[in-house]
Image: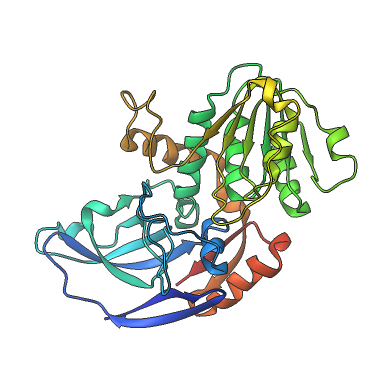
Amino acid sequence: MKSRTLYFIAPKKIEIRESELPAIKGDEVMVETICSAISAGTEMLVYRGQFPNIADANDSFSSDLKYPLAYGYACVVRIMETGAQVDKKLQGKLAFAFHPHSSCFIIPLSSLFFLPDSLSPEAACFLPNMETAVNLIQDGAPILGEKILVLGQGAIGLLTSALLREFPLASLWTSDCYSLRRGASSALGVTGALDPNAKDFHESLPRDFDLTYEVSGVPNVLNDAIAHTRFNGRIVIGSWYGEKRTQIDLGGTFHRSRIKLISSQVSTIASELSARWDKARRFGVVWEALRRVKPEQWITHRFPIHEAEKAYRLLDENPQDAIQVIFKY
């Protein structure tokens, strides 16, 4: 059987390559992909050639990146064939795989995460982003009555805001430069969803947030986070900037502010939680959060895999028109 896999071959150049699948080993299964989600943050760095070489990264998805590259990590699949050591009753079961965009592939059964019966394939496409959002919440540790700001309302920002809406906060503000995303944020019931490019942005936004999340993917937005976080507050940085650089204002009030900058990345669990939390426990929380939030409401575009070039061009040239883009197979 032939597989069609998406490859990034150079900045802003992609190919769909066909290859024969190998024989299935005893502990493996052959799966067909139903849908897969594009990460508008990480994958666009790969698409644009803005990723650094991180040989010592803590996750296999961002280490030693170079072209040509099959990349992606959000496939929802159906098991079609099983190896000799795998129960044939699993054929037809739906599962999630951290795997590049591909129409079908061979994978160890142990690498799959089976979907709860109550969850649709399109909702399950958001599993990596929801795990990231859960990790952001755990690293920020919101407290009852706090004032919180989320900078950036792409898929991860919206998921983070949706989870924060479940807390008894004093207020929850968000910002994004695209009106489509601000509208989705407002629909969550946040206190306010502002345009950071508006002339009155800084005047309209409070400057006493206890906890600020920077998930815009734009490095200079850190300056907004610093400006609007109160003395002894926390800023959780969830964006991966790749090779993007900017000047961060660490002079002025920051020097005396005792603001804590927290790096948050989903491949590990904070050391203060690791005695009680592991990936399995966190995944249980993630599945339940996906059921409650129903993030499939934020899918704005669905492309067949052979039109992948159109999907990436949309996110590159007209990001204001999209929130979550997925491939259908």
Q: How is the image coloured?
A: rainbow
In the rendered view, does 140 fall on the left or right side of 251? left
Q: Position of residue 7 (x, y in %)?
A: 43, 74
Q: Position of residue 195 (x, y in %)?
A: 80, 46
1 to 109, vertically: above or below: below
Res 189 visible = no
142 to 63, vertically: above or below: above
Of the 4 image quadrants, the one containing the C terminus is: bottom left
Q: Residue at x 39, y 43 (%)?
A: 267
| Image-quadrant location for residue 237 | top right
Of the 4 image quadrants, the one containing the N terminus is: bottom left
125 to 275, vertically: above or below: below
Q: Nearer the viewer, residue 127 or 253?
A: 253
Q: Nearer the viewer, residue 193 or 207?
A: 207
Res 75 visible = yes
| Image-quadrant location for residue 221 | top right
Q: Residue at x 9, y 63 (%)?
A: 84
In the rendered view, does 4 fall on the left or right side of 85? right
Q: Residue at x 71, y 50 (%)?
A: 181
Q: Residue at x 40, y 70 (%)?
A: 70
Q: Nearer the viewer, residue 102 or 45?
A: 45
Q: Residue furthest top?
A: 145
Q: Position of residue 118 (x, y in %)?
A: 43, 46
